[in-house]
Image (cartoon, helix red, strand yellow):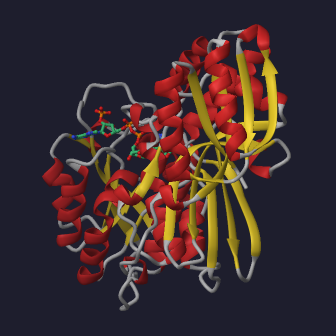
């Protein structure tokens, strides 16, 4: 860059903003050794000037004036860590228009407005980097655009939301210790919020929106095809019960909220987020707590699993600071159009085939009607618990659209409770 200082506006001093501040101070010498630059924070944008902060940010740097923080001509890089769509999107756009590099951890903005912002950054000849927006400290976006870019990626399967992973694990542990599942769900969500893993509105985590945004970003870079968020199928974890987890474990499976993106044989791309039964011996099953794991398949490297801390102050700050180093080293973007913004066809989940775990609970006549229907479609395994008025089954591979339609009819006819969870192939 030819400068000894890179001047920064930090938008946000919450969990991630405080982590970035601390890492910049603690690793200042290392960052200088890596880049030849000193990183100097000029403004820290917050909502409240009086709020106690997790990092010792000098009060004179704090401001509530977004325009001052974003448009200060002395600032080279704007780091957006506010969260939510607005005002984050507008401030990023203003910063790019003002010729500043932008780094963001905001998956919502990058999934919903990334195409426009990437194009704007390219036109402005500045960098727009967002490694922290997907899987925290894991260098997944950088790898897809760099070291792995020579591979044709065939499938990406990831645990990309830490809050739900933390909740599901805590529910499993709670069940082992006799705690009711609903109590462990509530306790785990509260803990995930205290630890700074959850979004400001945790609905985004538990209903799968956060993972949906991340998968749209990940799929775009893995398959070089623009993926609109609404093309990503989404289910969260709130409909899961402790009984699902008890049965899954008994049958040799764990339950994870998985994001999957894959190129189908007909060339279309399918991207989806939903709870999934995973064999206990699958490497994704050991990914616990605030960790994320992304399992990639490509025609050169074959199989790869990235696994690491993906939420919380310092792991996320690690990715943000990595982007900052990249800006310091390579401030000029390559003058080529971003191939990941190419349109392409996506396939709806209804056209896919899955094996399903089915758990039915109800009166014997209700259970019998479900058993009969499943028998006609093909059952690979059936286990009964007569005392609980319940059975579980694994189906043969079935087409999603047909199967879900039939299950909806069965639910209405039998009056029983029927849970359905897809199984990882
Ligand atoms: P957070 O703890 O809620 O912090 C948000 C910060 O932004 C706060 O300092 C807040 O000010 C400030 N802010 C919010 N809206 C503002 C506005 N309109 N004007 C001025 N300041 C505003 O959020 P976070 O957990 O650090 O997350 C930040 C971003 O990183 C989000 O996009 C999130 O999805 C992403 N991310 C988070 C994690 C994680 O583990 N937490 C991991 C990866 C990515 P006050 O402090 O004064 O309220
Ligand atoms: N709320 C997000 C999660 C933060 O739990 O994964 C990391 O992106």
Classify residue 240 by image quadrant: top right
Q: Position of residue 320 (x, y in %)?
A: 48, 57
Tell me what residue is drawn at x 43 percent, y 56 percent. Answer: 232
Q: Determine if residue 72 is in view.
A: no
Closest to the observer: 78 or 4? 78
**Quadrant holding the C terminus:** bottom right
Q: Position of residue 68 (x, y in %)?
A: 15, 53
Tell me what residue is drawn at x 57 percent, y 73 percent. Answer: 144
Closest to the observer: 358 or 373? 373
Q: Is residue 284 above or below residue 205?
A: below
* Count of numbered tags: 0
Tell me what residue is drawn at x 59 percent, y 30 percent. Answer: 419
Q: Position of residue 305 (x, y in %)?
A: 73, 61
Q: Is residue 228 above or below residue 170?
A: below
Tell me what residue is drawn at x 45 percent, y 74 percent. Answer: 328
Q: Position of residue 182 (x, y in %)?
A: 58, 14
């Amino acid at each position: 860059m030819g400068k000894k200082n890179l001047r920064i506006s930090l938008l946000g001093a919450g969990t991630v903003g405080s982590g970035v501040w601390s890492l910049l101070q603690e690793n200042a010498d290392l960052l200088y050794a890596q880049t030849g630059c000193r990183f100097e924070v000029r403004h820290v944008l917050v909502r409240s000037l009086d709020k106690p902060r997790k990092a010792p940010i000098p009060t004179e740097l704090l401001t509530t004036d977004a325009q001052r923080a974003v448009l200060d001509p002395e600032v080279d890089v704007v780091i957006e860590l506010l969260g939510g769509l607005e005002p984050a999107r507008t401030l990023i756009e203003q910063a790019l228009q003002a010729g500043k590099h932008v780094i963001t951890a905001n998956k919502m903005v990058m999934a919903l407005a990334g195409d426009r912002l990437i194009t704007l950054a390219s036109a402005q000849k500045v960098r727009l980097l967002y490694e922290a927006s997907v899987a925290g400290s894991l260098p997944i976006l950088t790898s897809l655009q760099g070291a792995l870019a020579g591979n044709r990626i065939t499938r990406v399967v990831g645990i990309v939301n830490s809050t739900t992973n933390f909740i599901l694990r805590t529910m499993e542990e709670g069940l082992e210790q006799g705690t009711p599942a609903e109590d462990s769900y509530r306790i785990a969500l509260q803990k995930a919020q205290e630890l700074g893993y959850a979004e400001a509105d945790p609905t985004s985590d538990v209903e799968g929106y956060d993972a949906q945004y991340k998968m749209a970003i990940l799929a775009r870079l893995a398959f070089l095809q623009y993926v609109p968020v609404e093309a990503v199928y989404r289910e969260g974890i709130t409909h899961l019960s402790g009984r699902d987890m008890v049965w899954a474990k008994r049958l040799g499976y764990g339950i994870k909220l998985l994001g999957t993106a894959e190129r189908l044989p007909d060339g279309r791309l399918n991207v989806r987020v939903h709870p999934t039964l995973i064999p206990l011996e699958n490497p994704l099953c050991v990914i616990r707590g605030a960790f994320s794991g992304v399992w990639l398949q490509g025609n050169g490297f074959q199989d790869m699993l990235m696994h690491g801390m993906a939420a919380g102050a310092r792991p996320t700050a690690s990715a943000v600071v990595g982007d900052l180093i990249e800006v310091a080293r390579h401030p000029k973007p390559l003058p080529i159009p971003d191939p990941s913004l190419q349109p392409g066809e996506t396939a709806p989940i209804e056209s896919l085939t899955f094996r399903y775990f089915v758990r039915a609970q109800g009166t014997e006549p209700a259970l019998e009607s479900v058993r009969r229907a499943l028998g006609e479609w093909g059952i690979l395994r059936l286990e009964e618990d007569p005392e609980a008025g319940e059975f579980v089954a694994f189906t043969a591979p079935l087409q999603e659209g047909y199967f879900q339609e039939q299950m909806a009819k069965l639910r209405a006819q039998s009056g029983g409770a029927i849970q359905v969870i897809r199984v990882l192939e």
